[in-house]
């Protein structure tokens, strides 16, 4: 674990809030990272520690944000780094612990039968403390571990490749042991705030049971749903049936099911640990409840935006829409940049002079980014589609006529609020809170009018038609611009966002003092 200490934090003092961050701030640009930076800067009276979780150190080099002065500590945990394990020796293993693990696995297959959070927490803490439990060596090499794995395979996965199953089990458990290994080195804080479930949520559960500190969860999107989407598509999970393309079953192969069930279980575990659970939209609140969260612990706090940053853009809006389309986001599969590119080819048939800007980083998934560039070339769009990299949104928005989100999953996208604060309409797919933002979520809100258009996922034709509709009708465009301005100023205040979190942090810190 890499640890960076800042002089503002005395060694004998706690931070007020430790943010647990998986694959995001301060090493990755994006909407969630921007939100985290916004919260830290907006609450200068609170001292924050950052606990960053990544896969391998080589993938996270430079900080993408200048850390505010109230960030007093940064720890970096890399859970997929190779570990040095001594030469294997014969070992029986702890039969009682593997019996307990077997019971837990049976519970994972019937997650609604009972609440397993206490048992899992106790087991994890036992592993961390070394009391009556297993070590990573035991898990990798003991007779009990081998017996457990082969027994599970014979019962549930014997129609899959044993090698695929075996290495999937190892890959699933490696990050868990990595987190347990550094648990004692986690900095002390009054409150721990995880910004997702997943590995960050798992670490927060370990911290809750080991340090007896309050845990807060904020989900921007639904982590479990997004992992399901990714795991159903990735090609590094292989199964014999998939390899030969037999078409004998439409079900996901067992290794994929294992990965999905792992993240489902971790999601439920995080929901049971955290209080409060914060989400950004009513739709996501309903999804969290369906996934096992206690409705009484959930509160909805939408994102907010600083309208003053975009005042110049609003005031300088032209009469007719600039013929520039802006895609603002990371070039990664979940943003479905390929559908955006295909839509731009259709728009060019009606408006040959228009331009499309892709504003965002390509370093998170280089393979996908290269595929997108190849698609641009194959469509002959090299002069029309311009890669701008990371830009100050307020500065580039002044030249943009329409902003586009072609994502297959979202929470409450900050880029939509920034577009509205700029007085620009948005064309977005029907995911997350996009429809609520663009069309309004209540009767009063809908009365403000539509601030753009909603289209189906992966529908490049509809995406192109919606964009062309704004380019072709200046009055229609202006009305959407006015609706965007009114909606963001009435419902998505940055000050309200800060005050909500200020109250939540204060209440959690008080609980910590009383514990």
Image (spheres, helix red, strand yellow):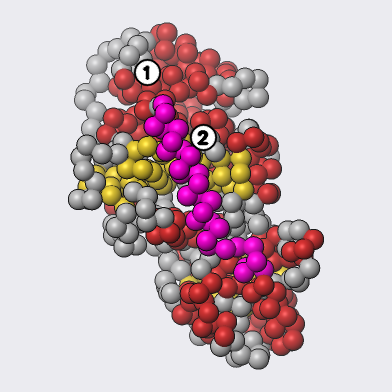
**Magenta segment, which residues?**
487-515
Residue located at (65% from left, 66% from top): 490
* Mark 2 Cα-neighbour bin, 10 Å: few <14, some 14–19, many ≥20: many
Tag in front: 2 or 1:
2
Residue 156 spot, x, y in % from top left: 58, 22
Between 38 and 1, the one nearer to me in the picture: 38
Q: CA distance from mark 2 to mark 1?
A: 20 Å
Location of residue 137 with respect to 513 vertically, above or below: above
Task: Tell me, for residue 126, which label it has, or none.
Answer: 1
Q: Quadrant of residue 3?
A: top left
Between 230 and 130, the one nearer to me in the picture: 130
Residue 320 spot, x, y in % from top left: 66, 90
Task: Give the dominant element type of the magenta stretch: helix, strand or loop.
Answer: helix
SS class, disc 2: loop
Mark yes or no: residue 163 visible. Answer: no
Residue located at (49% from left, 60% from top): 31
Residue 48 spot, x, y in % from top left: 35, 48
* Mark 1 Cα-neighbour bin, 10 Å: few <14, some 14–19, many ≥20: some
| 492 in the magenta segment | yes
Location of residue 298 with respect to 116 vertically, above or below: below
Is mark 2 in CB contact (under 8 Å) with mark 1?
Answer: no
Q: Which residue bears the numbered disc 2?
A: 274
Residue located at (54% from left, 38% from top): 276
Between 328 and 371, the one nearer to me in the picture: 328
Q: Quadrant of the C terminus?
A: top left
In the image, taking residue 468 as reference, residue 339 lies left or right, namely left
Task: Tell me, for residue 247, which label it has, or none.
Answer: none
Residue located at (77% from left, 63% from top): 444
| 446 in the magenta segment | no
Q: Which mark is first along the chain, 1 or 2?
A: 1
Location of residue 222 with respect to 306 vertically, above or below: above
In the image, taking residue 315 as reference, residue 482 lies left or right, namely right
């Amino acid at each position: 674990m890499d640890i960076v200490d800042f002089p503002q934090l005395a060694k004998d003092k706690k931070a007020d809030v430790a943010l647990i961050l998986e694959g995001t701030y301060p090493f990755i640009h994006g909407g969630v990272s921007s939100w985290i930076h916004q919260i830290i800067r907006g609450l200068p009276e609170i001292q924050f520690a950052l606990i960053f979780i990544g896969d391998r150190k080589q993938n996270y080099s430079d900080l993408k944000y200048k850390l505010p002065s109230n960030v007093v500590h940064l720890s970096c945990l890399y859970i997929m780094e190779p570990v040095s394990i001594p030469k294997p020796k014969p070992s029986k293993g702890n039969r009682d612990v593997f019996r307990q693990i077997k019971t837990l696995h049976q519970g994972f297959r019937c997650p609604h039968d009972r609440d397993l959070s206490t048992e899992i927490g106790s087991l994890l803490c036992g592993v961390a403390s070394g009391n009556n439990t297993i070590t990573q060596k035991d898990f990798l090499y003991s007779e009990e571990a081998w017996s457990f794995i082969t027994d599970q395979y014979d019962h549930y996965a014997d129609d899959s490749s044993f090698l695929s199953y075996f290495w999937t089990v190892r890959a699933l458990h490696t990050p868990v042991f990595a987190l347990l290994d550094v648990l004692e080195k986690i900095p002390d804080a009054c409150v721990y705030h995880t910004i997702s479930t997943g590995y960050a949520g798992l670490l927060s559960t370990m911290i809750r049971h080991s340090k007896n500190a309050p845990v807060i969860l904020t989900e921007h999107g639904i982590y479990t749903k997004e992992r399901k989407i990714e795991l159903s598509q990735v090609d590094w999970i292989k199964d014999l049936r998939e390899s030969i393309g037999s078409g004998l079953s439409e079900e996901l192969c067992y290794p994929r099911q294992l990965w999905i069930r792992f993240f489902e279980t971790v999601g439920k575990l995080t929901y049971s640990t955290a209080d409060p659970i914060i989400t950004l939209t009513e739709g996501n609140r309903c999804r969290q409840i369906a996934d096992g969260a206690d409705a009484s612990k959930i509160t909805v706090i939408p994102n907010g935006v600083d309208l003053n940053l975009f005042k110049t853009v609003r005031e300088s809006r032209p009469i007719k829409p600039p013929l520039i389309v802006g895609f603002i986001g990371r070039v990664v599969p979940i943003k479905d940049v390929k559908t955006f590119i295909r839509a731009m080819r259709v728009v060019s048939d009606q408006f040959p002079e228009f331009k499309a800007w892709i504003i965002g980083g390509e370093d998170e998934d280089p393979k996908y980014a290269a595929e997108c560039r190849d698609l641009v070339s194959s469509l002959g769009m090299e002069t029309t589609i311009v890669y701008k990299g990371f830009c100050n949104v307020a500065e580039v928005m002044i030249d943009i006529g329409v902003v586009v989100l072609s994502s297959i999953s979202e929470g409450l996208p900050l880029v939509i609020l920034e577009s509205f604060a700029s007085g620009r309409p948005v064309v977005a797919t029907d995911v997350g809170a996009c429809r609520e933002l663009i069309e309004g979520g209540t009767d009063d809100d809908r009365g403000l009018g539509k601030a753009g258009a909603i289209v189906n996922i992966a529908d490049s034709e509809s995406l192109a038609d919606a964009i062309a509709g704004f380019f072709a009708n200046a009055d229609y465009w202006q009305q959407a611009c006015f609706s965007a301005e009114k909606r963001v100023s009435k419902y998505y205040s940055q000050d309200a966002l800060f005050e909500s979190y200020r109250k939540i942090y204060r209440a959690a810190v008080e609980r910590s003092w009383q514990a």
